[in-house]
Image (tube, rainbow, N blue to C red):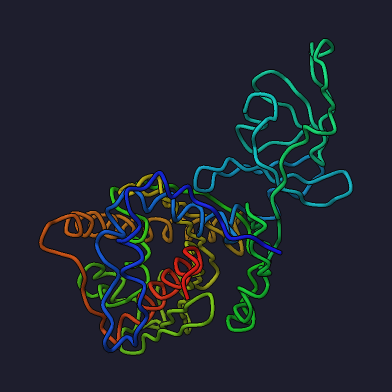
Amino acid sequence: MHSKPHVPTESFTSLDFVEQNLSIIPIERSETIPSSWYTRPEMVEIEKQCLFNQQWQYVGHVSQVEKVGDQLIANIAGHPLIVVRGKDNVLRGFHNVCRHRGGPIATENCNSHMLQCKYHGWTYTLDGMLRGVPRFDRAELFDKKDYGLIPVEVDVWDGLVFVRCSSNSTMKLQTILNGISERIAPINLQSKIFYKRVKYELDCNWKVYVDNFLEGYHIPIVHPELAKLLDCQQYVTETFDYYSLQYSPFVSDESIYGKGKGEAYYYFIFPNMMLNILPGRLQTNIILPLSHRRTLVVFDYYYDDITSSEALTKIQNDIEYSENIQQEDIEICEHVQRGLESSVYDKGRFSVEMEEAVYHFHTLLKKTFRNFLDLP
């Protein structure tokens, strides 16, 4: 039997600001989630426990852990993590925390035949068992079998590596992402090659950034160049059990992404991952809270070809184009955060035509919090 995630509620003055805003009604009559969910520091711990710890989280690509001894590190909502390719060719995940005094097992992606703490040199086998403890022979009642690395779940989907910190949920990764590979065919994400990681820090709550991603309503105003690329009249939003899709064909048969018919798929996977799929390119996007009003956005760029001169030119154009859009999003999201913190705003309404995916995200948040608080 799986227990519910636990948050030490005694550390909060009150959870009423969450419980009083969990009603789910049709989008035509629904209000947005309240501003307090974007501005209260207490929300960060609640979300870490019942969202980020419980849900599958993307950390990288299988090509980064292809060889025995390859190590891929990540930090998800305060949890340092490491994924390792074992001698049996199995991928395993662990908390990147030595059982001695909390030192890091790895501080960067690397390869080695064993895992060694960078603080005092405790060593572990690639399957997480404690092997070496320097100058520890005088310790009493100490058994190395009791001090292996703490494991986390690992799974792979279309070449992308995911981890999950908690075992409270039994939801399979394939179930959550069911239908995406078939929908984008003949595009094959497994064939994409990792090129570059880019990070941004924003002065806004992580949900502000997600809300912004989930609608094309703002594109003509905030992204004039993107509006020239996408056919906003044919911009379609679809929602599924655990993800949503925004889809648009290109306006012209010729763009920075090449000649011929083009289209864009913008997937959001609850609670904090995006897949931006354009011709010849996959861009993954992870949104991580640093505090109640500070967010880390991590982009990974993947392409069909990262070596030819023609491909490198296209990649440079794509990254520059994406950088401009990102800066526009950063500016508007930070303005929105200040608006949410003002005394005059609490809740808004949804455009039924343009904000279905935002409503879908808010509904999934409410369902998750209801379950967390054990409410009917």
In this view, 347 is above or below 15: below
In this view, 130 is above or below 217: above
In this view, 291 is above or below 363: above
In this view, 94 is above or below 53: above
Viewer-proximal residue among 191 and 56: 56
| Position in image of residue 203 (x %, y %) | 28, 48
Residue at 23% x, 60% y: name it: 332
Residue at 41% x, 84% y: name it: 237
Q: Is residue 169 left or right of residue 17?
A: right
Q: Is residue 351 left or right of residue 237?
A: left
| Position in image of residue 310 (x %, y %) | 53, 60
Residue at 81% x, 39% y: name it: 126
Quarter the N terminus occupies? bottom right
* Res 174 quadrant in image: bottom right
Residue reaching furthest left?
344
| Position in image of residue 125 (x %, y %) | 83, 34
| Position in image of residue 96 (x %, y %) | 65, 37
Residue reaching furthest front?
10
Viewer-proximal residue among 232 and 141: 141
Number of numbered callouts drawn: 0
Q: Is residue 133 left or right of residue 14?
A: right
Residue at 58% x, 40% y: name it: 80
Viewer-proximal residue among 100 and 317: 100
